Image (cartoon, coloured by chain):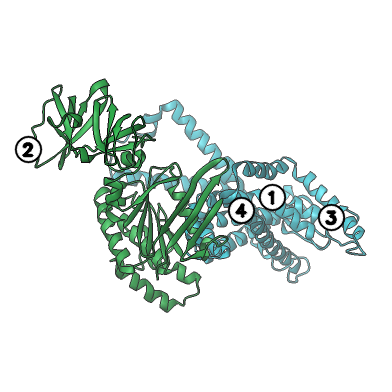
Chain colours: A green, B cyan
Amino acid sequence: MSAGVELDRVTVRFGEFTAVDNATLDIKGGEFFSFLGPSGCGKTTILRTVSGFLEPTHGHVRIGGQDMSGIGPNKRPTALIFQNLALFPLMSVAENITYGLRVRGVDKASRRKKADELLDLIALPGQGDKLVSELSGGQKQRVAIARALAVQPKVLLLDEPLSALDLKLRQHMRSELRSIQQKVGITFIYITHDQGEALTMSDRIAVMSDGVIQQIGDGKAVYDAPTTAFVASFVGENNPFPGIVAQADDNYATVDTAFGRLRGRNPRGAKAGDKAILFVRPESARLGQGETDTTFASTVKNVAFEGNMTHVYLEGIGKKDVTVSVGRRSSMTIPAPHEATPICYDAELGIVLPEGMLARE
Amino acid sequence: MSSRAFVFIIPVIVIAIFWVMAVREAKRRPDPTRKGFFERNGVVLGSVFIALVAFWTLFLVALPYLYMVVESFHPALPPMKRGGPDDVVTIAQYSSFVVNPTIGAVNWLHMSALLFSIIASIAVTALNFAICYPLAYYMAQAGTPQKIRLLMLGLIVPYWVNEILRAFSLRLLLASRGLINQALMGLDITDAPIDFLGNNTGLYVGLSYAYLLVMMFPLYNAIESLDKNQIEAARDLGAPWWRIHRDVVIPYAKPGIASGCTMVFMLSVGSLAAPQFLGGPRTLWFTAVIYDFFFQSFNWPRGAAYAFIMLIVCIALVMAMLRLFKVSLGEAIK
């Protein structure tokens, strides 16, 4: 019942502006696939192109191997869940859920049956006669999902549907969405700017920036092995150390940064003399002395206790900021503000990537 | 004292009732922080407020209508006989709508005039809705800002032209030797001129055109506030365009539709100029009947009675329609 979605060199332009630039990717049937990126990166445009509200300027969208050009959104085997859900306020919950079936001419009794079935799936049994306005935020969310599932789409498209919910509910809905997806087994394409959502739910993630797909991979790959400076800086926190590569081999490279010469892995094969950025995640760094090419000096600016973590904000040479996160169980003693301390990290947790645009804070 | 004193007594009674209600309410739930009206506004300003509101509601709103109501229950008499023994309270003016007093027969002429005015106005309302709905939808949901501005300008500017000029230019256009007939005959579509004015085409066109904006703006306002995602959601769920309108847009815009239709209908039934200038020779609009009673036969009581009959029939009809389409009055006059 699920179908793969294939983007074949898809470019979408609005006048002079290129919203999506030559995107090629292959989403497998039954996959939970997320597009992750900051607002304005083109991820919603991709979603609207897949759902049929937009036609690509160049390239093709294929769903289940079938070219979708010229096929309108009401004829595609997709269903879209809108950011604001767009439930019909004048219809009851059951009428909302079965609207797609009513349009297809399904008779009333079967519609009622289907509504009950879906209400059970979304854990709102017997609430079909309520008005949408009587539901809570999370319930509306689930009704929107049921409404989309009712038409038995092969691909479900979700446009940041959780962004309007509060934190606790959002975390709860993440696991709920994931379990619904596993139950119905259809392809989910999920749009979000929230890396937590993307990382927890997705089989694979495409990180986007300025209309370009930067990296495609599972959550671990995107987090641990970013391939561009943008991905490294956008997914999770990261300390960038820009500089010039001093020496490099297949595995490691050293970079001359403002903090001195520092070493890290070299996955993109940077060569001596290249402009590059070394990234070290706050949780990969430690306060203390290590080897010379993975240690640099700094001064503590302030300390922020955040429950599970303590973030130490430090200032390195040239007033550059560095963050080190200390876990709760760590035996590290945290120095007071204005104290000087060296920072070190393991060379395999540093990563050297070609210079590129960083995610805006 | 004649029964006309009612005109002045009724407002006094109404004011007295409200006064008593206000005093009782204040006693039942005393509010120590409450300040009196004059305490809040001062004596001078307070008096001015009361005088202005009283002038507005009594002299401009209540009294003229009340006077007409009372007048409609009196016989038409020459001035010297007013207040005399002949000046009795009577429903003769109202019953004359049903039975013609001079010939003693059923007054088909006037009843059919009212019926025709109402049916024609319903047709005008329907026509206006059919024209305005697509336009309003386009302007509210589909058009680009520049195009909407242009369209708005095109809709509003013609209304700077006064009604008489508009009616007569339409007449020129539709006359038997007018531009349209000349064009139709020139193109060999018809041999003889079509009598657009005689068959009331002119009447419908003129009335629809006159109240186009009255329909346009409530519709536009209602549709404009509809979330675009609702339309897209319906489309995404497989609805063809006509179903989207039937299931999503029209139910949402219903109060606006009701408001526009009510106003167009009421104004159309009550219009005087367009039916007179553009209606056919056999067409009798009910307002023309009323007009004639007032200004031709100087029978104000009967004119007033007819005007109230029209008002009541129209209000009843509108209320029935609102109920039929399940719109509350509050929504429709928003």
Question: Label 3, label 1: how many angstroms apart (C-alpha)?
Answer: 48 Å
Image coordinates of residue A69 in percent, x first then y, are: 56, 60
Q: Nearer the viewer, mark 2 or mark 4?
A: 2
| Residue receiving disc 3 | B174
Question: Which three-letter amino acid code belongs to the residue tagged 3?
Answer: Leu
| Residue receiving disc 1 | B82
Q: Nearer the viewer, mark 3 or mark 2?
A: 2
Q: Is residue A112 visible?
A: yes
Residue drawn 63% across and 56% down? Answer: B134
Question: Which three-letter amino acid code belongs to the residue tagged 4?
Answer: Met
Question: Looking at this view, is A259 or A310 the one in front?
Answer: A259
Question: Looking at this view, is A263 or B207 the one in front?
Answer: A263
Q: Few, some or many C-alpha atoms within 10 Å of disc 3 (few <14, some 14-19, many ≥20)?
A: many
Q: Nearer the viewer, mark 3 or mark 1?
A: 3
| Residue receiving disc 2 | A331
Question: Looking at this view, is B107 or A99 the one in front?
Answer: A99
The quarter of the picture where the N terminus of chain A appears is bottom left
| Chain letter for mark 1 | B
Of marks 3 and 4, which one's residue comes earlier in the chain?
3
Q: Is residue B323 visible?
A: no
Of marks 1 and 4, which one's residue comes earlier in the chain?
1
